[in-house]
Every structure is written in C-alpha cells, then in structure tokens.
Amino acid sequence: MKTKIISTAICAAITSMFAGNVLATNGYSPHGFGAKQKAMGGAGVAVANDSMSVATNPALAVDIDERMDLGLALFSPKRSYTANNNGTPGYPTFEAGEFKSGKEYFPVPHIGYNHVLDRNSAIGIAVGGNGGMNTEYSNAVFAAFNRFPAGHPNNATTPVGVDLKQLFVGFNYARRINEKHSIGIMPVVAVQTFKAYGLEPFMGASTSPGNVTGRGTDTSYGGGLRIGWHGKLNDRLSVGLSYQSRLWMSKFDKYEGLFAEGGDFDIPSTVALGLNFQVTPKVMFAMDYQHVRYSEVNAIGNGHNVPMAGTVLGTDEGIGFGWEDMNIIKLGVAWDFRPDMTFRAGASFANQIVPTDQGLFNILAPAVIRDHWTLGLTKQIDKNNEVNFAFAYMPEEKVCGTNVNTGSQSGCIQMDQFELEVSWGLRF
C-alpha cells in the first residue's frame, strides 16, 4: 500500500510539471526545495527538514525520518520591459513604451520520499522542477529588426516569447560515517523542454535559419551528480557542503540555430555551504552561501555587447543571454512556538546576473530578481501527518541600460514575483 501511494504521487507530480510551466527565481534556479526550506529564505544545506532537503544536500537523509512530502506552489511572476524613444536613426529599435508579458500564474509541484535502511544509511527520491525563461508578449517585439542584417527580410510575428521547463529526478543514498559526519550522493536525471516563437528577424543572423523560431516544443535529456557532506561540530552547531556538477544535456536540435554550440543548453553547476545553529532549544538559525555558474554554459553566459551583424547565432561563440555567475546569501530562522506548531522566516540576497548592456535577448527572460522575503508555518496534525505553508515575496528588480544593437537605445527590463506553497508531510 505504501509503495502504491508513493509511486502514484511521483507519477502525478511528474505529469503535472510538464502540463504547466515551471519557473524559478534565482536566474532559473529555485530559491529552495520544499515548503520548509523555502519559508527559511532557501537556507537548508545543514538543515534536515524533510525528504526534499536532499535536493540541496544528499547527506541529510540519515537525519530524516521515513517520510513522504508532497507539495504544490502557486507561482506568479510579473515580467515587462520598457523602451525609450531615443534610438539612433538607421539602427533597429524597439517600439517605445512599456510592454507586459502575459501568463502570470503557474502551478509548481514537488515530491520527495526518504527510506531509512538502518541507523546509518538511507535512500530516497526527490522530484522537482525549475525554469525561469518564460514570457509571452502580444506585440511584435522585434518588428524593427525585420531587415537586420540587410538582405534578410524575415518579418516578425506575434505573439513573441520563449518557454523553458526543466524536470529533475534525484536518486539519493546517504551514509553516516560516524556520530558526527555523514556523506551523500545523488545521481540526477534531467529532462527539459523549450520553444520559441516570434523571433523571425534573427533567422538571417543564424548558421541554421530554419531552426531559430516557431519549431514547436523540443525536448532535451541528460544528467549529472550531486554530492554532499554534513558535519555536527557540537550539540548546537552543524555545517553542510554540497556540490552539483554541470548537468550534461542533449542538444535542442529544433533550435540549433538559436542557441550557441548548435542548440546546446546544459544546466550549470552549483556549490553551496551552510550552517545550522541551535540558538535555544526552540529557536534555530540557518545561513547558506550558494554559487551558480551560469557563465559556464555558452547559451546562457555568452554576451551580445557587440554589433550583431558581426556575430552569428548557433556558433560556439554565438550570442546568448549574457548572464554572470550568481552568488546568494540565504538566512533563515525556525521557532517551535508550541509542540504542534513551528513558525519560519527568512531572506536571501544575490548579485545581479544581467549586465546593463545585455537587454536584447533578456527581454525574453528578464531574470533580474535578487532578493527574497519569506514566511512559513508547520502545523502538526498528528504524530504522522503535518501541513506546511510557505510564502515568498520577491520585490521588483529593474535593470536599465543601453545596447549597441539598437543604436544605444535605452530601456529597462523588470520583474517582481510572489509564491505561495503548501505541502503535506506523511511519516511512515
């Protein structure tokens, strides 16, 4: 019966992830995994909250009960761009004004299961998703680029947008080395889908003009490895360290003319360090540092601050989104208000990954959010069941600048977000 419940829940979560759009907030990485961690600003490298904690640090599994966690978030990003009427004559420019992307509400499910083998080892599975490159504009964003470069009059169509979805399934094994230290390893299988539309003017600047836009949804498969360590330095302080390798993905063949390296879109590596300090028997404080290496993937890290007439889409050095690496500080606190109730709060702060001269393609993916403010609550229903709530607010972030491809026309890309998540924890 238990096996049937778990397998049915995992299948339902995977199906629903690809039925809707899956998005995230630190670039296109989530600020945390599971309602408890998200309520603490995403801090959790050294905090064994629930079965989703292993998605951050696989070593935590030996400190988690046998349990399943199933959750659903309502995520709402508001994306827009503003173009000023000051472009240089003779250059393609954006229509002046502020333009908002549609599709502002998305369901985001997750599921985790932790199975205790014995006192010193555990296995499990964690299923989650992310994205962040999702927009749909009703105006012809690139209409003025129709004859750029010269001789390629590919008229822009509407709507204009992109949609990236990513699904991760991690299979976890953790082992307690001794009373103070544990390690974990998690092979990660990833599936991602992508589509783009309304980008016809860029076909003339591509090595594969027929594989730039309007090719429908393409699917990419791959994987990598996450490893982790958790050390209990004393009765009140513990430390965690985790690393996820670059996830090597098959190419988006339908969009080999859009992305650098002929459609290659690997998922960047991350490293995180965290601590967990028990301030009092009822109050716990956590702090993480996370580094996401967006620059190591050419399709994401390559910039476009040179005239596009001299740059070709689809090549190894083809233009991309120009994202820089992201450094994030996450802070969280949990307070056991009473035996059946825990309050949580947190915040996270990151550097801006979108430079001011990289507005061209980031209109399609204005992933400029830096700060998160979070709250949450856990209510214990009985000894085996609990309900968790998490709320995150990401205040508006705006990046303004100019771009050489639009004759130094100035403008801004902006975004603000909120997320409400509820999950159910079941102990076996």
Image (cartoon, rainbow, N blue to C red):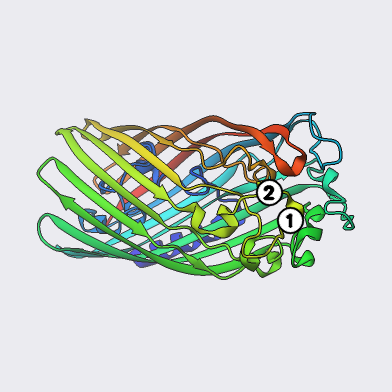
Give the quarter of the figure containing the N terminus: bottom left
Residue 365: quarter of image: top right
Towards the viewer: 236 or 313: 313
The numbered mark at residue 306 is 2
- Say if residue 350 shows up in the picture: yes
What residue type is disc 1 on?
Gly
Above or below: residue 270 compared with residue 116: above
Q: Residue at x 76, y 47 (%)?
A: 160
Give the residue displayed 18% in from the left and 32% down from the top: 282
Which image quarter: residue 360?
A: top right
User: Which residue sits at x=68%, y=51%?
Assistant: 162
Asked if labels 1 and 2 touch by Cβ distance under 8 angstroms, the answer is: yes
Which secondary structure lies at badge 2? Answer: loop
Measured in 3D between alpha carbons, the distance from the residue under mark 2 to the one under mark 1, in whole angstroms, is: 7 Å
Q: Please indicate whether residue 89 sits to the left or right of residue 2 in the image.
A: right
Could you tell me which secondary element the residue under label 1 belongs to? Answer: helix
Q: Residue at coordinates 57% horizontally, 62% vertically from top-left? A: 265
Binning the other alpha carbons within 10 Å of mark 1 as few (below 14), some (14 to 19) or many (20 upward) gives few
Read off the residue under disc 1: 310
